[in-house]
Image (cartoon, coloured by chain):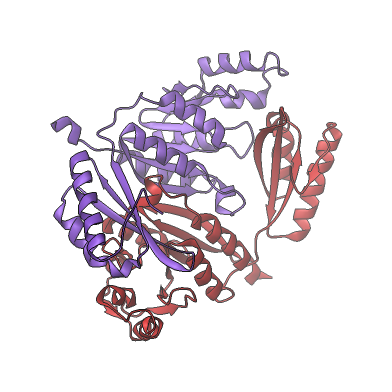
Chain colours: A purple, B red
Amino acid sequence: MASQQRIFTAALVVIGDEILSGRTHDKNIAQVATWLQIQGIRLKEVRVVADETPSIVEAVNTLRARNDYCFTTGGIGPTHDDITVDAIAEALGVPVIVHPEARAILEEYYTTRGGLTEARLRMARTPDGASLIPNRYTGAPGIRCGNVFIMAGVPSITAGMLDALSGQLEGGAPLLSETVGCWVGESEVAELLRETEKTFETCQIGSYPFWGEGRTGANFVIRSVSAEDLAACTRALVEGLAAMGRPAVPGGI
Amino acid sequence: MASQQRIFTAALVVIGDEILSGRTHDKNIAQVATWLQIQGIRLKEVRVVADETPSIVEAVNTLRARNDYCFTTGGIGPTHDDITVDAIAEALGVPVIVHPEARAILEEYYTTRGGLTEARLRMARTPDGASLIPNRYTGAPGIRCGNVFIMAGVPSITAGMLDALSGQLEGGAPLLSETVGCWVGESEVAELLRETEKTFETCQIGSYPFWGEGRTGANFVIRSVSAEDLAACTRALVEGLAAMGRPAVPGGI
């Protein structure tokens, strides 16, 4: 039981001018967040930083120190704007090397695709002491250095890397959740939410309002590591809403 | 000319457990990023933090100190999990007050909607010394305290608040961009990109690969504050691609 109580945390650093300019809508935050939930790891913070070495170094060094795991996405391709490996090596205080295993993977991958050029060989560069995260799509692997996991920016490739890491990282009890929706203004139920949350110590209730069909509604998300408390808290909330003449919609609206 | 060279920067703090859990896909990062571009303000960093006071205080205090503007989204509703105003007051070292103007707005808004309850009155609370950002959708205003702009989490309401702020903030020359696409592996053009960027000092070139129709392609985004340099750099890149037998697609693929 005690070991189940240990909470494992992670942070994500999204590296990319294209996100900060608004040109590209990030898809990696939601994808990494969802994957971490399943691994029983709590995503505590995300930072989106520019393609600039000092910004990457600061974010990675702050976040790897205060979390069990630190993930990065973006900036590991073959072009001049791909500076993630160099920046993280600097953050870790180690040199960049050409990783022999990564080089072998790329040599094989490019055998039928025009050969391993100097630009492509850039993708075999890793901080010294790293291991690789397989990428079944384009050869170029992700990189693990201690608790730092360096992944691609292209969401489909990141998905493959996460898949390769599934079940590989130690996690705690996953945070469970239940959602109930209700056609009610959230200000009308503020007191009920506060009191219900207070009654169930292991539970948090989030309230997410929306407007639709000319009416006001909200979804309430109850979260807990205890399945029992989660069920009891959800039941109490549904009963409280019913007592106000506001039937709850299981699963949300 | 000299005043045009001053670069104005902003940061965004997205406050929300629902984003970190993967339940909700954030839409405010792209929306705020795009809006800032038009105002001539450079978005330098985004942080997504949990609904926890210390996390909000740390992010806001770090980012407001090193940027011209610091925006936040989320956590300003009527329920117990809406702690943004209190956290930012703590960050600024000022008390929370009930803002008379905000109270008047809410009183009017709720006249025909069941009256101003205690929960609803929470939305009139601001850090002391704040001014308001109008919200034409639901009455409850956004809040400005010095260079900190506190906005809603619901993207359509945030959009209204950004609209109210349009043209109100001092910005510099907007960062202009051109995109060209090409059916080419980015590793094949890595050298061309690097050399072209080096030739045009005010320009940055970003390379964004993709896979589609069974082929490999990339979009190249050239950015500059100088329209002249941007045009010249784009022309040089297109000519370089043509010389390799790789015709560029204006506007991207």
Residue A66 location in percent, x, y?
Answer: 29, 42
Residue B203 seen in render: no
> Is B96 situated left or right of A61 in this image?
left
> Is B129 situated left or right of A151 in this image?
left
- Identify which residue, B130 or A244, lies in the foreground: A244
Vertical comparison of B108 with A53: above or below: below
Residue A188 location in percent, x, y?
Answer: 29, 70
Residue B164 location in percent, x, y?
Answer: 53, 75
Q: How many marks?
A: 0
- Identify which residue, A213 or B205, lies in the foreground: A213
Report which quarter residue B193 is drawn in.
Answer: top right
Vertical comparison of A8 with B151: above or below: above
Q: Quadrant of the N terminus of chain B?
A: bottom right
Q: Quadrant of the C terminus of chain B?
A: top right
> Is B237 situated left or right of A37 in this image?
right
Query: At 43% across and 48% down in the image, what residue appears?
Result: A47
Residue A17 location in percent, x, y?
Answer: 57, 48
> Is B90 situated left or right of A122 in this image?
left
Vertical comparison of B7 with A171: above or below: below
Vertical comparison of B118 with A154: above or below: below
